[in-house]
Image (spheres, grey):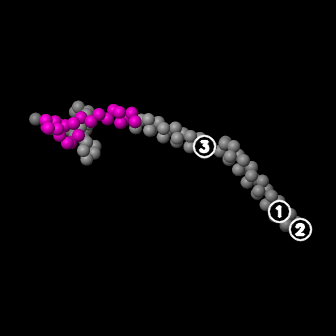
Amino acid sequence: MTEKTNVIIDDDLYMDVDTSTINSKSNNKDNTANVVDISSKFDEINEQLDHIEVSVYQLEESLTPQTASYHNAGIFVNIVLGIIFALIIILLIL
């Protein structure tokens, strides 16, 4: 008689590899394992992952240097550095 191959998922859950079902270790009165319906949980997880993917894409797009805020900051820094260098040159000449 062959033994069933089980993969332990959690303290109370295991997966039967032969039948591809996820069962609970706690038994019923009939001494049979409870089959856990996880298809709805996967749908919720996929929705959350889609939301996270959209957020990550928006974060990556916000960090591109072509945005107006980075352009304005670059112009401001160049103006300030230009004024500082001009003052240093004027002080060296006088």
Judge by depth and name the residue closer to the eye, 27 or 3.
Answer: 27
The answer to whether residue 16 of the structure is visible from this angle is no
Marks 3/2: CA–CA distance:
46 Å
> Which amino acid lies under the numbered mark 2 shown in the image of this protein?
Leu
- Locate residue 6, reporting x and y percent: 22, 40
- Circle 1 residue: 87
> Which amino acid lies under the numbered mark 1 shown in the image of this protein?
Leu
Instruction: Give me the residue at 44% from left, 38% from top.
Output: 48
- Locate residue 50, reporting x and y percent: 47, 36
**Of labels 3 and 1, the one closer to you:** 3
Instruction: Give me the residue at 27% from left, 36% from top.
Output: 36
**For this view, does 7 lie left or right of residue 92?**
left
- Compared with 91, 34 (above or below) is above
Instruction: Give me the residue at 21% from left, 36% from top.
Output: 34
- Circle 2 residue: 94
Q: Are marks 3 and 2 in contact (CB under 8 Å)?
A: no
Q: Secondary structure at mark 3?
A: helix
- Circle 3 residue: 62
Q: Secondary structure at mark 2?
A: loop
Quadrant location of the C terminus? bottom right
**Of labels 3 and 2, the one closer to you:** 3
Query: From this viewpoint, which residue is outermost toward the front?
Result: 29
